[in-house]
Image: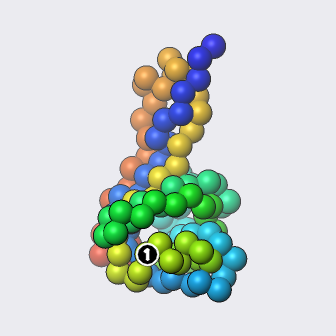
């Protein structure tokens, strides 16, 4: 049986609110955004910076619900600055036939990274 990797979840054009170089690496993300995009804590993600073209892989740490936080931590903090727009993406591996009808979760945050 063939399997394929497809887009599972995406937050399109969130704004980086913090960059913390001296924290253990990851991305801290508002729990409301996590729920809306069907992300879970420690899930592997790709972060694509719209402002500078940087791409990185890391994982999610749950941030305070309703805070709007999108914080690049550790070495990831070198890949973006406060105010940059980012796309946060995760993928899933599934059966090829199931992938044909799968619909990913896509979130378009409003000002302040609110839903």
Quadrant assignment, res 110:
bottom left
Residue nearest the viewer, comparing 29 with 24: 24
Number of marks present in the image shown: 1
Quadrant assignment, res 48:
bottom left
In the displayed structure, 62 sits above or below 35; it is below
Numbered disc 1: secondary structure: loop
Q: Which residue is denoted by mark 1 in the rendering?
A: 80
Residue nearest the viewer, comparing 28 with 57: 57
In the displayed structure, 91 sits above or below 81; it is above
Instruction: Please give left or right for residue 15 compared with residue 32 in the image.
Output: left
Instruction: Please give left or right for residue 30 compared with residue 103 in the image.
Output: right
Q: Residue at x 50, y 77 (%)?
A: 78
Locate residue 92, reporting x and y percent: 57, 38
Instruction: Please give left or right for residue 42 compared with residue 34 in the image.
Output: right
Colouring: rainbow
Q: Residue at x 43, y 23 (%)?
A: 100
The answer to whether residue 67 is seen in the rendering is no
Locate residue 103, reporting x and y percent: 42, 35
Residue furthest top as drawn: 1
**Quadrant holding the N terminus:** top right
Instruction: Please give left or right for residue 40 compared with residue 10 in the image.
Output: right
**Quadrant holding the C terminus:** bottom left
In the displayed structure, 75 sits above or below 37; it is below
In the displayed structure, 4 sits above or below 44; it is above
Q: Dot 1 surroundings within 10 Å: few (below 14), some, or many (20 or more)?
A: many
Q: Residue at x 53, y 43 (%)?
A: 91
Locate residue 73, reporting x and y percent: 59, 77
Locate residue 33, reporting x and y percent: 47, 64
The answer to whether residue 113 is seen in the rendering is yes
């Amino acid at each position: 049986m063939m399997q394929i990797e497809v887009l599972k979840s995406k937050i399109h054009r969130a704004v980086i609110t913090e960059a913390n170089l001296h924290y253990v690496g990851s991305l801290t993300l508002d729990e409301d955004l996590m729920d809306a995009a069907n992300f879970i804590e420690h899930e592997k993600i790709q972060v694509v910076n719209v402002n500078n073209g940087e791409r990185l892989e890391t994982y999610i740490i749950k941030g305070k619900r309703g805070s709007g936080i999108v914080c690049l931590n550790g070495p990831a903090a070198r890949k973006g600055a406060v105010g940059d727009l980012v796309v946060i993406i995760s993928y899933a591996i599934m059966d090829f036939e199931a992938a044909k009808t799968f619909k990913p979760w896509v979130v378009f945050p409003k000002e302040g990274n609110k839903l």
